[in-house]
Image: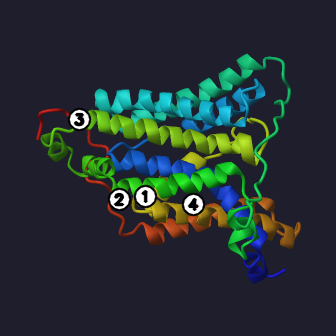
Amino acid sequence: MSVLDILLTLPFWTAALRIATPLIFGVAGAVLCERAGVLNLGIEGIMTAGAMTGWLAVHLGAGLWGGVLAAALTGALLGLLLAGLTVTLGLSQHVSGLAVTLLATSAAYFGYRLALPGAETPPRIVPFAPLALPLLSDLPVLGPVLFRQTALTLLALGAIAGLALFLARTPLGLALRAVGENPAAVEAQGIDVHRLRAGAVVAGSALMALGGAFLTLSAFNAFFFEMVAGRGWICIALTVFAGWRPGKALLGAVLFGAFDAFQVRLQQVAGGAVPGQVFLMLPYLLSIAALLAGARNARAPKALMVPFIRGER
């Protein structure tokens, strides 16, 4: 099988979109936070906590959508903590975000051990099954790729589309963008900058947690330590690659998913002739190249990582 044969198959692009789904949730949350002027480095821990609480809620009988809600609430609470540190108190966004990552990751592992103290392997759940939407799933090309995914993949696509419309077409979205550029001007219009920034961080963190929940409720059927595997940091990089634009962020997430799906198929073609570690690092190398090419002219929001103190100009 040639490289072209791999790239032209529908199962390849179906897998690419599936792999990209947690990144779509994560990068949507990161774009929302950063357009409001807050760098959320808690994303890796928030995704881990969302993965654990979503899975545990389903294991305890809450149902799949109950698990999704539990994950989103977990992310929102962690976002509220981060907003309190960075927006209200004006502490370093770098340090606060890393602290939230360490806290959320450790709390997720502790909660797992506390809930299942004697479990050698995590209990399995029944995850979301791929959908087969009438008429839509039978469309040529787009049908198998878009409409035979699980409900969470469709939710991720809806979230990124909704975010794009929110930022571009709604008064609240325009105010949020202005907060990331010139918060003093927004305050002069009588809008509470702290409340707007905090709301963006809470909502963005909830989206990030859904990215983690996808791993346990859709991609797999259990929670494993280290299962997020750096996806949060990839989302931070993809946000820069996208120039803080939701549409380009979606493109970057799918591109990384395609790189990852591609390396799996290359391993099958190459057999044991090449060490597997070479293929595992391939999507990261290709992503770095894409980031360097795409982020060269990216312009960050002017007030990103700049604390806002009321009354100062």
Q: Relative to the observer, which residue lies in front, 303 or 155? A: 155
Position of the C terminus by quadrant? top left
Local SS, label 3 = loop
**As shown in the figure, which amino acid type bears the numbered disc 1?**
Ala
Mark 2 / mark 3, whichever is N-terminal: 2
Q: Is residue 227 left or right of residue 246?
A: right
Q: CA distance from mark 1 to mark 3?
A: 23 Å
Q: Identify which residue is drawn at 79% across, 17% down.
A: 117
Spatial CA distance of label 4 from label 1 is 15 Å
**Residue matched to label 2:** 168
Identify the residue shown where x is 45% and y is 33%: 79
Q: Amino acid at mark 2?
A: Ala
Question: Which mark identifies residue 164?
Answer: 1
Residue neighbourhood size for the residue with mark 4, other residues' Cα within 10 Å, grouped as few (<14), some (14–19), many (≥20): many
Q: Position of residue 43 (x, y in %)?
A: 52, 41
Q: Is residue 193 above or below residue 81?
A: below
The picture quadrant where one finds residue 108 is top right
Amino acid type indicated by mark 4: Ala
Q: Mark 3 against mark 4, which lies toward the viewer?
A: 3
Where does label 3 land, which residue?
192
Task: Say which element carries label 2.
Answer: helix
Total numbered labels: 4
Q: Which mark is residue 253?
A: 4
What residue type is disc 3 on? Asp
Is residue 57 shown above or below 206?
above
Name the front one of labels 4 and 2.
2
Q: Residues within 10 Å of mark 3 (few under 14, many from 20)?
A: some
